[in-house]
Image: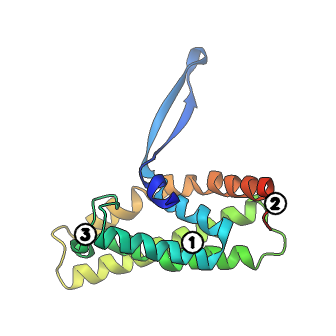
Amino acid sequence: MLIIICGMIPSSIILPQEGLSLSIVSLNSSWQIHGLFLTTLLCGSQIGTISAISYLIIGLFYLPIFHGGGSIGYILTPQFGYLLGFIPATWACGFLAENDPSPNLIKFSLYTIISLFILHFIGIIYLIFGSIVKIWINNLFELFIINTLMPFPSQLLLCLPISLLSIAIKRTLLIK
């Protein structure tokens, strides 16, 4: 449920301006991936992986909860490879966090960053496969820019706050 809710929340940062005013800069990403990483950091690799698989099943067969909608036809979109990357990314994030005897903000941030790279790696492989079999209208380079290069910096930026939030929740709830 957290993944679905986070998928609806746009990400942005607040920057100070002259005269003590603030401006809000929208980022090219949602909290969807980071909601999944938060679930995984808090509950472990098994729950995180089950959450990722459940999210895919719900989006493919029941509700249009993906960024571009949903249904079984979503498999033929370039973005679906990134959704497939949720599964190994959450497993890796949870595995690293579970096997760390002394977790801290730097390590949790590193685990989410590694998982983000895994997610994008799977997405890029899917883009390459789709380009080879001529599924996509756009060329591979355009799809790579749209689906990886544009959202990646903001997704990378959100790894630190999600790691901080997971540590704060773990300490508040006394989760080991």
| Amino acid type for the residue under numbered disc 1 | Ser
Crowding near pointer 2: few (<14 within 10 Å), some, many (20+)? Answer: few
User: Residue 62's spot in the image, x, y percent?
Assistant: 30, 68
Q: In which quadrant of the rendered view does residue 69 lie?
A: bottom left
Task: Provide the residue designation for mark 3.
Answer: 71
Q: Nearer the viewer, mark 3 or mark 1?
A: 3
- Mark closer to the chain start, 3 or 2: 3
Judged left or right of residue 60, residue 108 is right
Q: Is there a contact, CB below 8 Å, between mark 3 and mark 1?
A: no
Q: CA distance from mark 2 to mark 1?
A: 25 Å
In this view of the protein, which residue sits in the foreground, 12 or 9?
A: 9
Q: Residue at x 69, y 58 (%)?
A: 166
- Residue 40's disc is none
Q: Kindly identify which numbered label has been placed on residue 115.
A: 1
Q: Residue at x 31, y 76 (%)?
A: 127
Q: Which mark is residue 174?
A: 2
Frontmost residue, 139 versus 14: 14
